[in-house]
Structures are given as C-alpha cells and as structure tokens.
Amino acid sequence: MKLQDMTALARRLPEVDIKGITADSRAVKPGWLFAALPGTKVDGRAFIPQAIENGAVAVLAKPGTEAPVPVVESEAPRLTLAQLAMVFHPGQPRVIAGITGTNGKTSVARFASQLWSLLGHRAGSLGTLGAIAPGFDYRLKHTTPDPVEIHQVLHNMTTVGTTHLAMEVSSHGLAQYRADGVNIGLAAFTNLTRDHFDYHETFEDYYAAKRRLFTQLLPRGCPVVINTDGPFADRAADDAEKAGRRAVTVGRKGELLRLESVRATATGLRVEITAEGKGYDLHLPLVGSFQADNALVAAGLVIESGHPAALVLPKLEQISAAPGRMELAAVRKMRGGEAGIYVDYAHTPAAVETVLQAIRPHTAGDIHIVLGAGGDRDAAKRPQMGAAAAKGAQHVVVTDDNPRTEDPKLIREQVAAGAPGALVIGDRREAIHAAARRLKPGDTLVIAGKGHERGQTIGEVTYPFNDIEVAQEAARQPGVAA
Ligand SMILES: CC(=O)N[C@H]1[C@@H](OP(=O)(O)OP(=O)(O)OC[C@H]2O[C@@H](n3ccc(=O)[nH]c3=O)[C@H](O)[C@@H]2O)O[C@H](CO)[C@@H](O)[C@@H]1O[C@H](C)C(=O)N[C@@H](C)C(=O)N[C@H](CCC(=O)O)C(=O)O
Ligand SMILES: Nc1ncnc2c1ncn2[C@@H]1O[C@H](COP(=O)(O)OP(=O)(O)OP(=O)(O)O)[C@@H](O)[C@H]1O
Ligand SMILES: N[C@H](CCC[C@H](N)C(=O)O)C(=O)O
Ligand SMILES: [Mg+2]
C-alpha cells in the first residue's frame, strides 16, 4: 500500500510502497514502516539504524527525527501508528463494544459475546483470554495488544465472518492509544479501584486513561453502559454526558436495567431485574454476586446494540463464566462432608474483597484463601490485598504469583504485612496443598490471582503452572480432616 494513501502526514514525502508496519525494530522486514516510539524503558528512535538494516523503507517518529528513509513526522506517533494500522489492515467487525474498568472486563466481554451468539450472531471477544470467535482462537500477550496486532487480529476475525465483538480496553491500552483506530460503537465501564499504580501515578491519572474510552474513542451520541454499583460510576456518567456520549445505567440504581435483588443458590444466582417496567426472575449459572453486575453490563451492551430486553434477558440463564473466574476447580471429599476449591483471577484489593464476600453465602464453614501479588507491578496494592484477604477469610496462605524480576520473599512480606498471622509458603504448589489439607467439611478455599494463567514467571522464565490442576491434585491428598 502506498504510504501517501495511508496518511495525510506523508503528503510531501517521496512515494514509497509499504509492505508491513511494526513498532519493533527486531520485527522489521524489507519494505516495512518502522514506528520509532518513545517508550517507558527506551526511546524507539535508538533502533532506527537496526530497522533500516532490516529493510525499513519509512519511519514514523516525532518531528525532527533524522533517518535515511522518508520520515512520517507526528507529534503523537502512537496515535498515528494506530491510524496507520487501521488503514493497513482495514477489516473490522460491524459491531464492536469496548469494555473498560479495573475488574470485570474479561467477564463482561465473554458474557456479551455469548449473548450475541445465543441471539444468532457470529460473535467473539478480544482481551486477556485472547481473541476468540467461531473458527478463531488466538492467544495474545496483552489484554489490549499494540495497534498493529489489534488490527491484524480484527481483520482476520472478519475474514472468518465475525460480525460482533466485545473487546477489553485496558488502561495501558488507552494511555498508549493502542485502540484508537478501532471502530468502537458501544462502550462499557465496570468499576474503578486500585491497580497499576506502578504505571499511572495517581488515581486521577488512572481514571483519566480509562475515561478516554467513553469521552474520546466512542463517537458522540453513542452509548456507554455504566454499572451504577461500582466506584466512579456517577463521575463516569457525568463525564460521558458532558462529552456528548449517552450514559446508560445498569445495576441497583440502573435506568435501563435495574437489579432488584440477587440471592446465591447452590448452583448460581437468582436475580430479579426490572427492564422497561417489566420484571424478570432469572437463574444465572454463575457463582459470586459480582457476576450479576457483570452480566447486567453485558446485557446492557447487547440491548444497546439493537436487541429488545425481553429477548436478551432470558438468555442470561444460558451463559457461563469465563475460565478462571470463580471456577469450581475441585471438591475435597472427607469424612463428614466436602469442601469446594475455587480458582479466581482476583489480583487487586477490591477483587479479593469482592470474591471473599461473594463466596460467603456458598460456605457453611470457614473461608480459606491462597494469594500472592505480581512482581514488577504496583507494589502498594500488596498489603491491601493481604488486608482484604485477612478481612474476608479465616485462614490465609501467602505465596508467589509471578514474582518476575523482583525478590519473591520481599513481595510475600509485603502481602503478609496486611495479613498478620498468615501462613507464608513461597512455593505455590506447596501453598495450595497446605491450604487444602486444612479444609474441614463445609469450608471453601479460594486460590486467587492466576485464574486462567498457565505459568509462574520467576525472573524472565515462565514455568508451567496451572492452579486448577494443582487444586485437583491437592483435593486428592490425604489431610488432617480426612
Ligand atoms: C508499560 C507498558 O505498557 N509497556 C508496553 C509498551 O512498551 P514501551 O513502548 O514502553 O517499550 P520500551 O521497552 O520502552 O521500548 C520503546 C519502543 O522501542 C521499541 N524497541 C525496543 C527494543 C528493541 O530492540 N527494538 C525496538 O524497536 C519497542 O518496541 C517500543 O516501541 O509497549 C510495548 C509494545 O506494545 C509493550 O510490550 C509493553 O508492555 C509491557 C511489556 C507490559 O508488561 N505491559 C503490561 C503492564 C500491559 O500493557 N498490561 C495491560 C493491562 C493488563 C491489565 O489490565 O491487568 C494490557 O493491556 O495487557
Ligand atoms: N464487577 C466486579 N467487581 C469486583 N470484582 C470483580 C468484578 N468482576 C470480576 N471481579 C474480580 O476480578 C477478577 C478478574 O475478573 P475479570 O478477569 O473479569 O477482570 P478484568 O478486568 O478483565 O481483569 P484484567 O484487567 O486483569 O484483565 C475476577 O476473578 C474477580 O475476582
Ligand atoms: N494482567 C494483569 C494481571 C496479572 C495477574 C497476576 N497473576 C499477576 O501476575 O500480577 C497484570 O499483568 O497486571
Ligand atoms: Mg481482562
């Protein structure tokens, strides 16, 4: 494709044919454009010589950058990269919902995709679990990948016929303009609580990144579905309206969908919802009352995409949880009864608190939790996660959860500082076994933090690790209560 046809910024440059785009000099192939982005660790302009050596025929960079090939100059190179990627890989599903918030994005994306499918669409989701649609299953390293990967994936998804897509948009993704070329016609905001303070300096910065989804990326007049029960809901609604977008509320104070009640049952949640003056009494096959909030956000998106509530809401009885979100991994049987072991992706203080509250009505005895916190990530959330664990559970085991390049012992100490008296066992398998051994009939164990993840990253190496498998193995071992 001619560079001149891709962006007006190339108008005065010599004609060049572009065969591919990347922001990584190591991935450049002959005929490609290299986007030299100012990064958090290094300045991408340092890699222009390597990119040229690999065959780059054009560079995108800040004004004033020198290179032996045509330079597309942009004051906002990340934004320009998103626009170039959009033009270069033009296919996009017809209906795209962007979902942001600290917790619940993956769950909402999976629910919306399932609802659309149940209504007869070829629907998919894109986010932490990868890009998933009928005939399409592609792993991603990031929740919201870099724009070149996003647009390649969107294009490929349309070639297999995907028409509806629910896409997670992380705060990193928003701050780095990764999704600015995506044709988002619907948005959702789940909640805002502490996470990623290693990257965003203040709560205000973190919120400002999230807000971009429904004050900038979403076109004017389009709806943003807001969960009224999450922190920052009122502010998000105000900001959306001020920016000319339509705030549509769901939840206990919701106008589109009002959640009248939620009650835990043995196999899920019984919910009463009012929509357009009509009452619905439904049984959702989901564990954890927070899933009712997520289900309502998803239903709100699907209704706003043009389906009547009367058709959408009954379909909620057929959805299933995303893998690793309150997943019943194993049941430990012992004399006198049994104890459920759940795997959940809670990795923020609010998520730990929410999950432990949610499991209470399903637990006759004590609640146990195994948790850690990720290395090279927000350190200040660690004692808060420990405190949330100590508040909601009677037995806490602190262990490792992807220490990455940090000292695992220090991370464990920081988590344990919030949970005095917790058992601290570095090795995650041993920690899970120890917790399972302590279970008594009627107790519940929550293994938090990894959810669907299939590895433990120590240093730069990721070792295979699966909480679900280890939970099943631990459930079979002999224990004190057996
Ligand atoms: C802090 C952060 O988000 N960093 C992301 C960002 O890196 P950066 O631009 O700051 O990169 P940098 O290392 O300073 O390098 C600058 C530039 O030089 C380029 N470079 C670098 C080396 C080289 O040899 N050649 C070269 O061209 C890089 O490609 C980059 O364009 O852009 C890179 C390319 O897209 C990402 O891989 C990288 O993700 C890092 C590894 C990461 O861990 N990000 C996580 C925290 C993240 O994005 N998470 C979110 C949220 C998840 C959640 O909600 O929980 C996600 O959406 O996944
Ligand atoms: N609505 C909610 N309110 C509070 N906590 C929630 C909510 N939904 C999910 N959680 C908790 O957060 C965890 C992660 O959920 P989910 O994967 O849906 O969120 P996410 O926003 O996609 O997370 P990430 O940003 O890491 O991709 C769940 O396992 C659960 O512990
Ligand atoms: N995608 C998020 C969640 C990671 C979950 C937890 N297992 C960890 O490693 O901290 C992150 O990178 O911060
Ligand atoms: Mg996610």
Image (cartoon, rainbow, N blue to C red):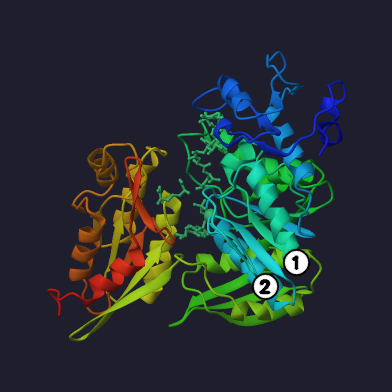
Q: Mark 2 or 1, which is nearer the eye?
A: 1
Q: Is residue 253 among the parts visible in the rendering?
A: no
Q: Quadrant of the N terminus?
A: top right
Q: Amino acid at mark 1?
A: Gly
User: Mark 2 to mark 1: distance in Å?
Assistant: 17 Å
What quarter of the picture does the C terminus occupy?
Answer: bottom left
**In the image, 114: left or right of 198?**
right
* Along the line of sight, the residue nearer the viewer: 227 or 254: 227
In the image, is the residue at mark 2 within 8 Å of ligand 2 by its beta carbon? no
Q: Which residue is mark 1?
A: 161
Q: Is residue 12 above or below residue 212?
A: above
Q: Is mark 1 within 8 Å of ligand 4?
A: no
Up-down: is 323 above or below 419? below
Residue 159: x percent and y percent? 74, 61
Pointer 1 local density, CA inside 10 Å: few below 14, some 14–19, many at least 20:
some
Secondary structure beneath dot 2 equals: helix
Where's residue 292, x and y in %?
56, 69
- For label 2, the residue is 115
Residue 228 vs residue 78, the one in the foreground: 78
Find residue 454 and report its image quarter. Answer: bottom left
Q: Residue at x 68, y 37 (%)?
A: 21
Residue 2, which numbered label?
Answer: none
Q: Which of pointers 2 and 1 lies earlier in the amino acid sequence?
A: 2
Q: Is residue 2 visible?
A: yes
Is 403 placed above or below 277 here? Answer: above
Q: Amino acid at mark 2?
A: Leu
Q: Position of residue 207 (x, y in %)?
A: 60, 40
